[in-house]
Amino acid sequence: MAYETKLQYIAQQGIEKAEENDFFLRSLKQHEGAELDRIVHEINTKVSAAIDCTSCGNCCKTLIVNITPEEIKDLAVVMNMPETELREKHIEESQQGACYINSIPCHFLEDKKCGIYQHRFRECRDFPHLHKTGFRERLLGTLLHYGSCPIIYNVIEEMKHKLNFIE
């Protein structure tokens, strides 16, 4: 099956289908969480295998990436840079101590590809989080990226079809 990967089209669909997606979100409350997880995992396995996210990089252009202190230490070693310098150049820290990349797009994005791909942060490795359990609880957050992530777009559209969703 061919999946949609044109970012401009997906962005337009995100706008046009906002109301439909809201109805879809509400309709999923009637489905059991474990069953939704099974469906999402099944569809995500097919879609993720067919779409090379490393040829897109759109998430790296649009997401705020949270990182752990351990990941900062590891990256400093990989980049052969003192941790303090890495933090000054690339990391922001909230008053509550949460750390995140201080630039959108990400500093490490190089021509649609991650310049630190083998050492990327857990949040980057896990995006779009469709392999995890608890999909129904994360659906609102997932739909925020519907118009920017080809994998999310195609998984949601296939879910609508599989669940016979009709607006």
Image (tube, rainbow, N blue to C red):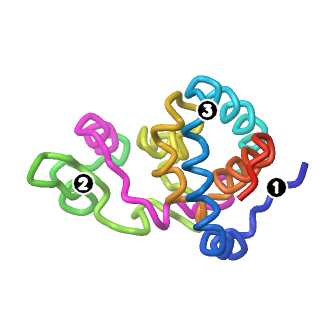
Q: Is residue 34 magenta?
A: no
Q: Nearer the viewer, residue 22 or 63?
A: 22
| 126 shown above or below 105 | above
Q: For the stretch drawn in magenta, what is the main secondary structure? A: helix
Q: Is residue 134 left or right of residue 92?
A: right
Amino acid on which disc 3 is placed: His
Residue 166 picture quarter: bottom right
The answer to which of marks 2 and 1 sits earlier in the sequence is: 1
Q: Nearer the viewer, residue 72 or 40?
A: 40
Percent x, y of residue 131: 59, 33
Percent x, y of residue 22: 56, 59
Q: Are marks 2 and 3 in contact (CB under 8 Å)?
A: no
Residues at marks 2 and 1, CA–CA distance in whole angstroms: 38 Å
The answer to which of marks 3 and 1 sits earlier in the sequence is: 1
Residue of label 3: 31
Residue at the image point whose x is 21% and y is 58% from the top: 92
Label 1: which secondary element: loop
Residue 86 bears which disc, if any?
A: 2
Near mark 2 (Cα within 10 A), the count class, few <14, some 14-19 or many ≥20, is: some
| Magenta residues, start to end | 53-77
Near mark 1 (Cα within 10 A), the count class, few <14, some 14-19 or many ≥20, is: some
Residues at marks 3 and 1, CA–CA distance in whole angstroms: 25 Å
Q: Is residue 57 magenta?
A: yes
Looking at the image, can residue 119 be seen?
A: yes
Residue of label 1: 3
Q: Is residue 81 left or right of residue 21?
A: left
Residue at the image point whose x is 65% and y is 74% from the top: 16
